[in-house]
Image (spheres, coloured by chain):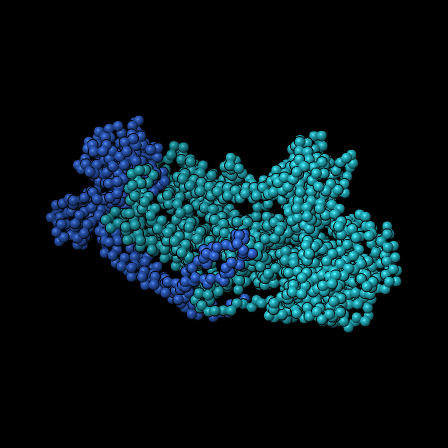
Chain colours: A blue, B cyan
Amino acid sequence: MMASSYNAKDEDGHHPGSVGSGGPGAVKSKKPDNTAFKQQRLPAWQPILTAGTVLPAFFMIGLIFIPIGIGLLVTSNNIKEFEVRAVAIATSYCVIRALCSYTAPRTKDFSNVFMYYGLSNFYQNHRRYVKSRDDSQLNGDKSSLLNPSKECEPYRTSDKKSIAPCGAIANSLFNDTLELFYIHPNGSRIAIHLVKTGIAWWTDKHVKFRNPGENNNNLSIVFQDTSKPVNWRKPVYELDPSDPDNNGFINEDFIVWMRTAALPTFRKLYRIIQKKKDNMTPTLPPGNYSLEVIYNYPVRSFDGRKRMILSTISWMGGKNPFLGIAYITVGSVCFFLGVVLLIIHHKYGNRNNNADIPN
Amino acid sequence: LNFCSWEERRVRANDRDYNEKFQYASNCIMTSKYNIITFLPVNLFEQFQEVANTYFLFLLILQLIPQISSLSWFTTIVPLVLVLSITAVKDATDDYFRHKSDNQVNNRQSQVLIGGILQKEKWMNVRVGDIIKLENNQFVAADLLLLSSSEPHGLCYIETAELDGETNMKVRQSLSVTSELGDPNNLAQFDGEVVCEPPNNKLDRFCGTLYWKDCKYPLSNQNMLLRGCVLRNTESCYGLVIFAGPDTKLMQNSGRTKFKRTSIDRLMNTLVLWIFGFLVCMGVILAIGNAVWEKEVGALFQSFLPWDPPVDNFLFSAFLSFWSYVIILNTVVPISLYVSVEVIRLGHSYFINWDRRMFCSRSNTAAEARTTTLNEELGQVEYIFSDKTGTLTQNIMTFNKCSINGHTYGEEQHMRVQALDFSAWNPLAARDFCFYDQSLLDAVMEGEPAVHEFFRVLSLCHTVMSEEKSEGELLYKAQSPDEGALVTAARNFGFVFRSRTPGTVTTQELGKAVTYTLLAILDFNNIRKRMSVIVRNPEGRIRLYCKGADTVLFERLHSCNHELMNVTSDHLNEYAGDGLRTLAVAYRDLSEEQWEEWSEHFRGADKATDCRDDRLAAAYEEIEQDMMLLGATAIEDKLQEGVPETIAILSLANIKIWVLTGDKQETAVNIGYSCKMLTDDMTEIFIVNGHTVQSVREELRDGGKEAEAPPPSLLESISGEFALIISGHSLAHALEADMEREFLETACACRAVICCRVTPLQKALVVELVKRHKKAVTLAIGDGANDVSMIKTAHIGVGISGQEGIQAVLASDYSFSQFRFLQRLLLVHGRWSYLRMCRFLCYFFYKNFAFTMVHFWFGFFCGFSAQTVYDQYFITLYNIVYTSLPVLAMGIFDQDVPEQRSLEYPKLYEPGQLNLLFNKREFFICIAQGIYTSVVLFFIPYGVLSHATQSNGVPLADYQTFAVTTATALVIVVSVQIALDTGYWTAINHFFIWGSLGTYFTILFAMHSSILFNIFPKQFHFLGSAHNTLGQPVVWLTIALATVICIAPVLAFRFLKLDLKPQLSDTVRHTQLVLQKKRKPGGRAGRGVGGAGGSRRSGYAFAHQEGFGELITSGKNMRLSSLALATFASRHSSSWIDTLRRKKHANSPGDRLLKIQLCHHRNKLHFKIY
């Protein structure tokens, strides 16, 4: 995109053997070597900003960015997203069954639907919060299990037993239960099957998080000398007793929570509603749905909010209008800038083409 | 005795045991700082005296406090250790070379008399009290008391160029009692004891007493040979070591070199302080934010995230958060800044060392950057202070032209013809003599009487001594190079001066030996400006031959010479216009009676005890009348190669050149003309020569007024160039506190300034004056020890190497062997260095602000908890691996225009002088750009990722994904920016830029790999992030978006600047690269030499010392063999040497004033330099 010229500078007329007396046995010449490097004559590409390179660059950016932006925006708009805000209605720390029913006017969608929970004003990115974990304990290290890292303070030990999993992150695990029912026009409630695996990074599930005790399937023995996190209602080995591959440290809800969010308002993947196998019926047929929340998680105290989001996914992920709009804007600005520069260039610019170089 | 040894030094010859008692320093010198054991502690101690290093140590300690530590300790310790070790390695190498050079000096051989036998000894083993033998052209090993010499009367000649820069030979004489101890056997028996002053740094003073055989002999500086001098024209001599090694006057004079800093350095330090202020502000803002957050949100959030135990309220938390933020924001001024700057300067220094076009094959010396920290200042020089002798000129005089009997010879040939070959007909001709005009030789052959007489004068009227080692091998010992040139010219044209005794001069005139009786030498002095000899030729005719300044001589010519005088005068004007040194030559026939009468008169004057000088002068005046003009000679004080061109180019580059010389006014002005500093087009040349405060002030005021007055017409303003010539004694007044402003203003209004007859100290004071008041970068260039003070004072000192003296080179920052290399040093290397350094700094501050400020914005979203945005490894490696090499490559290799262009267009040098490329304004632009980039880099990922999910539904808004995205975007943006900044893409640049990007991704994937995690699960918790993040198209779209938003405005802005207001360098570059037009080099040919210039004809421009005539006629400096013929005893037994010394400091009242001035200033300088 730039005018260039390879400029291997012409050799300077170097005079071989022009050294002093020069006779045999004469003093060794200290004349520096005549290499392109030492003489700063390395061949080089010397780009230069000219109207011929800069202006097309701007137009190119414009022409590339605007279509991409439009494409992104269209894709994003095609994604269906449905959000339920403010699930919490009751005071904290009382277990209630929140029963709400919503009308979800879903259009036909044959792909997987993803179910998220969202929290706002929750500072998972706080420095003391972020570091309050012991990755080697979570990786199944026996000694860390019984003697967790100091970073976990003050959630390191309880009743003189080490906490597993230790630290503030684990301690604040999101423990509401969300269930979704389809309200059949005939009034019956059909529970939607929610898949609770496959929601975490593969590396997290298979490398980073490991249960201690090798192949010992009886996790209660493995964790017997540890204590459950203070806020938890049940120990770590009872997170999902039904599925040994989703229990203990490798419970995916736990793993997802342990992957801290970058921003105080975030959402995390909760469940996946798998598409129908026949590819003929939509994953979530249009109709009324009821969301049932077992409310365990207190957010009122710090002015937090909970959400539940249902969303489909495209090649570029979830609904994300920002990217498309940004691309269109930047593309147009660049194009416009190109035009302005072109005008300026034609009207006032470029005296250096044939200017006399003042000396 | 012990008490005495404090006050005085006692040295007994040939008695090591006795001298050992005093524990005098040995002759071993040590300039190195460390040895193997002391290196580490001493070096570390020195390094931690640097504020920057201590600061980083402080940060390191902060990081070890867990409540504060927002970054792990290795983010600071890795760069710190790197920096400390690089510096340590550099110091170690420097010291190694110092050790080596010490060793080399210490191991020089000298001959020491031990037990009556001469033994070879290394210099370092020479002890005080030893007697050593010196041979011709050897360096004096220590401060010696001259005992005896091979020359008669214990005389020996030394050159003190390395000590005081004076190139004139000096005479030293031993005490007569010791000079008789000719051979080693006698000397071995010598057991005299010297009691003298303790070591000091006064070069011109020594007092002591020699006790020998129950007698006391006073000793003075006249008996001393100082270390650093070179023995000349003396076969050998013996000396007693009085001061050795560090006690010698040479070493006592080499004060600690002051550490020089460049203006960029100073600016950088100011900016770094500002940045620290900025950092504290950021810290305070974020700490306040933290207080508010902890109070409003954090307090409620405690059920999930309780405060750390020592923290019990939000204020304490804010206090800790301040320090945490100081730690994470400190990367705005990373430690690598200082290292990179040093590395770049080192690279530039190597380029200077490697430059073939600054290599002089004649002396086999390459340019050398002796200080590696000043390079970019070479691109900002505004004032050059140059020495004359040895720097502008070669100190070689050549007989260039002459005018004989109204006919001028030696006219400049357009096509250089072959130099005349004299050896064919004149076996005694000197081989290295060159003359190009055949007609003069023809005239000699044809036997033209005037021409013969002309050369006869040259062969007779001088004070040169000859030496004939073997038949025909003539060697002249001239005490001034001018005289040597004239006698050599006569020799080649067939009038060979062969030998002299006190009473005769033997010449060989066209192959025939002729012996003249030397009746009298009418010696040269400053007032007479001429010298004459009266000789009787073999036929018995008496003639007076005279040569001298034309102005003086023309007044004393016979009236019949009028016509010839006019013609010769025209010739002289012509010669002077070429900057040649001229002399007029005349003779007078004397009858026997006239001679008798005058010699009676003369003897009377000579014997007079009072007013001898005046009476002698009157006597001389009496006889030097009614002379017949023969012609004039023109001697070229050979300029160094390319001096006028260099000066022309440098003045086109707006650099002002001042010549500071110890030489006479006439000589200096001559050189001014010949190197085109002074031209005939100049409106006026002010000459300030006053001896009193008042007169100097008036002269300066006149000059100042005229130079500053608005030019009356347009024409005047174009050609209105002034020059100022000021002499040393006037300068003494001008440099006083109340007049220096006035002097400076006048001087700066002039295009050329020449200060003549200045002392080394005054040179330094002038430089200091300009440095202090003009805030401009000064460069001093010189070759001799007399330039050392100014070289050390100026911002940049340049020494001319390749000559014998090395004092100036040792004190200098850069050295090379030719003045003309200065243009390359400044216009090519200096300009590039400055450009590169400025581009480097701009980019460096930019990239670190872009990098660091992201944390600031993130602070608002993470509860001001000092959480970093990036992985800690990224923070550690960003400055030392990911972004360091491309900018280093740019800082070392970048070129905007090729070197030929910067010499063709000296105006390209101006941005450096005006400090345009990096100043506070540019700095703020860089900072603003950096902050803008950081905003984009934070908020674009923020906007995109907060809602985005991977294609498998997992949200992208987790911390690690965000960190990887931002870091990758940052690395790409700064790489694109460096690509935009790099103007000269060599393979190395390509390699570094692409390599850095490649390294980033490689390291990223390696650090996030499961292999490392399995080994250190606690350290590498970013497991899988790179893979999961960079596999997402959304992330790449985000990065592309951020890059375009960051770069597009920069591109548009640069394009507009280039398009609407191109700098000269842009235009030249554009012309060079795009239009590819072949342009002829700009008109920089020297101006034509103007015609008439009667005012500046050189006078008797000898670098000549009075008293040598007397020395000859006394026969003191003759060898005994040649004295055998001498019939008359020396007339003035010992007075000649006193005269020699006394006359050196002419005794006008003004000079006395000057001396007082000097003492005054010397005290001042002591404070300043030492």
Identify the image quadrant of the C terminus of chain B: top right
Q: Residue at x 62, y 56 (%)?
A: B391
Residue ranking furthest to the top: A160
Say left or right for B57 vs B405. Answer: left
Coordinates of residue B85 in the picture (x, y in percent): 46, 41
Res. B129 visible in picture:
no
Residue in the image at 25% along x and 33% along y: A212
Q: Residue at x 75, y 42 (%)?
A: B180
Where residue B717 appears, as percent x and y from the top left, is: 63, 68
Q: Residue at x 22, y 46 (%)?
A: A115
Among the 4 quarters of the image, the one containing residue B364 = bottom right
Q: Is B775 placed above or below B174 here? A: below
Compared to residue A113, the image places residue B1082 above or below, namely below
Residue placed most toward the observer, B107 or B703: B107
- Give the vertical position of A175 relative to B481 (above or below): above
Quarter of the image where one finds residue B745: bottom right
Q: Where residue A91 sits: x, y (%)?
A: 27, 38
